[in-house]
Amino acid sequence: MRQFVAERDWDKFHTPGNLAKSISIEAGELLECFQWGESADRERVTEELADVLTYCYLLANKLGVEAEQIVLDKLEKTRSKYPVDRSRGRSTKYDQL
């Protein structure tokens, strides 16, 4: 992705704020795939998901963090908020468990 962006001289547009906005915009387009029901065109969903992930990875790179590591770190925090014995099969927020 870095090479793709560099070849097009787009890095100057990729401020953290612009990338965060782009994530939100693309997530809205992904959500639009499901606007009128749960079934959606798989190819379109996959393309929109790729757009969301691309901007997420670009933002992580811009911030100097490893996307995979921050996901693992967050998962560890979430694991402590939602212990299996109290959260299994429930969608209750952690502060209500």
Image: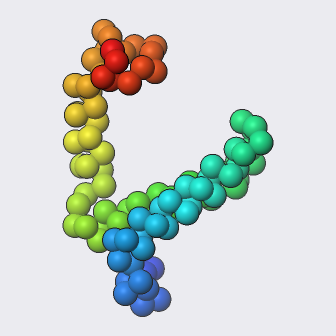
Q: Residue furthest front?
A: 96
Q: Is residue 31 above or below residue 55?
A: above
The N terminus lies in quadrant? bottom left
Q: Position of residue 40 (x, y in %)?
A: 74, 44
**Farthest residue in the top direction?**
85
Q: Which of the 4 quarters of the picture holds residue 95?
A: top left
Q: Relative to 6, is 82 on the left or the right?
A: left
Residue under the image location 35 percent in, 66 percent down: 59
Left or right of 49 in this view: 73: left
* Number of marks drawn: 0
Front residue of 9 and 33: 33
- State the residue at coordinates (30%, 67%): 61
Q: Name the residue at 29% across, 71% down.
A: 62
Q: Is residue 5 visible?
A: yes
Q: Is residue 50 visible?
A: no
Up the image or down, 97 lies above or below 69; here it is above
Q: Quadrant of the C terminus?
A: top left
In the rendering, at what x and y percent does residue 81 appear?
Answer: 26, 25
How has the structure been colored for display? rainbow
Residue 67, how many percent across, how many down? 30, 55
Determine whether, in the image, residue 35 is placed left or right of residue 30. Answer: right
Residue 9's spot in the image, x, y percent?
42, 90
Name above or below for residue 58 compared with residue 43: below
Q: Residue at x 28, y 31 (%)?
A: 78
Where residue 3 sits, quadrant-wise, is bottom left
In which image quadrant can residue 76 be found?
top left
